[in-house]
Image (cartoon, rainbow, N blue to C red):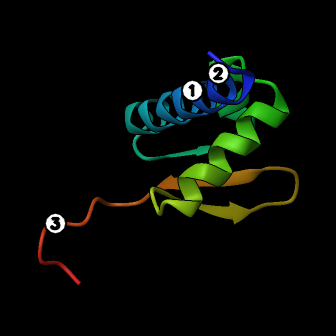
């Protein structure tokens, strides 16, 4: 497996861990809470958050020191 593929796989795994953590915490958490709970480096956390936001799975809200991360509701088929 090439380094790029390993990197991408790790990024996808981290994004999945974040989604799972958000679901277990009622759909909302701070970036700091996620970092501590999942034992991720800052870089790994923010890359995964960026991927999730780009795919419209989460919304990020800036705070004074941290981001608030909220899980977006899944859209049903046919929903606008």
Image quarter where the C terminus lies is bottom left
Determine crowd level at label 1: few under 14, some 14-19, many 20+ residues with C-alpha closer than 10 A: few
CB under 8 Å between callouts 2 and 1?
yes
3D distance between C-alphas at marks 3 and 2: 32 Å
Q: Is residue 70 left or right of residue 47?
A: left
Q: Nearer the viewer, mark 3 or mark 2?
A: 2
Q: Is residue 5 left or right of residue 65?
A: left
> Which residue: 80% across, 50% down?
66
Q: Give the residue furthest to the right.
A: 65
Q: Which mark is residue 6?
A: 2
Label 1's element? helix
- Residue drawn 43% across and 47% down? 27
Please provide percent x and percent y for residue 61: 67, 64
Q: Mark 2 falls on what kind of element?
A: helix
Q: Nearer the viewer, residue 57 or 60?
A: 57
N-terminal-most mark, 1 or 3? 1
How far apart are the alpha carbons under marks 1 and 3? 27 Å
> Mark 3 sits on what residue?
76
Measuring 57% from the left and 26% from the top, which residue is drawn there? 9
- C-alpha span from label 2 to label 1: 5 Å
- Name the residue tied to disc 1: 9
**What quarter of the picture does the N terminus occupy?**
top right
Quadrant assignment, res 68? bottom right
The picture places residue 73, in percent across and down from the top left corner, at 32, 60
Q: Is residue 24 left or right of residue 79?
A: right
């Amino acid at each position: 497996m090439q380094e790029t593929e390993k990197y991408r796989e790790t990024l996808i795994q981290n994004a999945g861990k974040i989604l799972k953590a958000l679901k277990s915490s009622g759909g909302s958490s701070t970036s700091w809470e996620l970092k501590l709970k999942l034992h991720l480096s800052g870089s790994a956390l923010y890359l995964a958050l960026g991927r999730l936001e780009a795919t419209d799975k989460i919304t990020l809200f800036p705070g004074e020191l941290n981001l608030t991360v909220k899980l977006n509701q899944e859209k049903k088929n046919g929903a606008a």
